[in-house]
Amino acid sequence: MSKNIKKILTNEYTFAILTRIISIFIALAQSICVARYLGPALKGNSTYINSIVFMGGIIITFGIHQAYPYFKKKLKDSSFLPRYISLVYLIYGIYFALSLAVSFCFTSADLRAAVLLMPLAGYARVVNYVHLVEDPNKRNSMTLIISCITLLVNVLLFFLTTANYSWMIFMLLFTYLTQSIVFTILLRCKPVYDKNSWGLAKEMFKFGLFPMIALLMTTLNYRIDVLMLKSYDYITYAMIGVYSLGIGLMDMIIIIPDTLKGVLVSKLSKGAPPEEVSKVSRCCLAATFVIFILILIFGQWVINLLYGTEYAGAYEVVVLTSIGVFFIGYFKLIAQYNIVNGKQVRNVILLSAAIITNVIGNLLLVPKMGINGAAIATSMGNCVCGFLFILSFTKETHTSIKDMIVVKKSDLSLLKNLMGKKKK
């Protein structure tokens, strides 16, 4: 029994799923705590600021974190990690100084807070991603611990303070700051600068351009609706708060592919074949379907019970975005394959069609249907996105669409491996 448990914990896919399942319950508890503490209006305000921070962090990061597995695979140099992290320290040191200066140019409290948080969010993303590539199991364990700490802090705020704008900003700051500190310490890299450093920086930024655009488009596909909703006078922060809760619940449906994409990129960077993508994709589809059914059946009851009737409209958002959920998982996995193999331009081209679909959908549907129109537009964008990525991958790798969708008997061996039994 102890050997089987050890095998489960050392299998990267299994461990990622186990930690993610636990993190789902933690995230759910945190979501409930934040929603009830802030209320729909402040929650909507927080979502708006965080959307700007998230997109701004992607732009200034310029895809250098996604360049890491590509150069790691290409160079196969043990000194690459300290050289890479040293450049990250330098780049983000400059970003932090600039953000402090630029923040004084804005009179809006929302924009000023967003500018100050951008470099911290970007840095947290980079060190988190690098640690994922280096040691998926340890990274997932630490992410779980950080989630528990964040939940504890939110619970303390709930019982000891009264929600206001300042505490809302603190909640955003705490998550990014904790990730930044913890993963910096775990990487244990001393600054190393030599004559090749600037050449490496140039190559990383050159490589990162298209992954940055692709990631920005991915984020826009998720968050452009929030920004567009904010532009309509009749859409209140409270309505945005309800919408963001629905989108957050939708994210829980795709929790499996979102988890395994990190392990997948680690394996692909170490030479795993394209078949790994199709195998993980079809298994994720089956798992996503099960989670979707559970949320569809119990979603309305759970929202009313745990979040309160003021968030009841979030269930409609979940239902309206559900069709696109099954397609977006494919994008998340196939996009990693493209990045590791230096085909980031393809991600940008395919995502362009998806984001255009989403924007047009929002322009046409939000004025007529409000937040439900934004939900339908998001679903449309996700469907287009996933379908195009499936077609592109199957054409290049000569994989049949059936192999991407239908679970095979051979996948049972994967299940056995996940449970700790090695195939003989």
Image: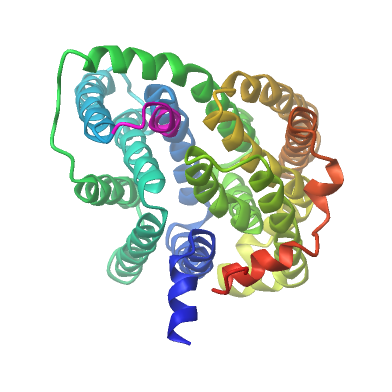
Q: Which of 363 and 326 is in front in this view?
A: 326
Q: Residue furthest front?
A: 424
Left or right of residue 405, residue 154 in this image: left
Q: Where is residue 155 in the image (x, y as percent from the top left)?
A: 35, 69
Q: Residue placed at 27% from the left, 36% from the top? A: 78
Instruction: Say which residue appears at 58% left-offset and 74% top-offset.
Output: 421
Image: 56 above or below 183 = above
Can you name the residue that lies furthest to the bottom here? 1
The answer to which of 63 and 37 lies nearer the viewer is 63
Query: In the image, is residue 6 part of the stretch drawn in magenta?
Result: no
Residue ID at (70%, 52%) = 279
Q: What colour scheme does the image use?
A: rainbow
- Residue 390 is at least partly visible in this image: yes
Picture coordinates of residue 200 (x, y %)? 30, 17
* Rendering quarter of residue 347: top right
Q: Quadrant of residue 376?
A: top right
Q: Is residue 227 visible?
A: no
Q: Residue 74 magenta-drawn?
A: yes
The residue at the point 48 percent across, 17 percent down is 209
Could you tell me which quadrant the C terminus lies in? Answer: bottom right
Where does residue 179 sit, x and y in percent of width and height? 30, 49
- Which residues are the magenta region? 65-77
What secondary structure do most residues of the magenta stretch adopt?
helix
In the foreground, 12 or 288: 12
Residue 105 occupies quadrant: top left
Q: Which of 86 and 4 is in front in this view?
A: 4
Q: In this view, does 209 lie above or below 361?
A: above
Is 391 drawn above or below residue 213 in the view shown?
A: below
Taking 325 as reference, is 336 left or right? Answer: left
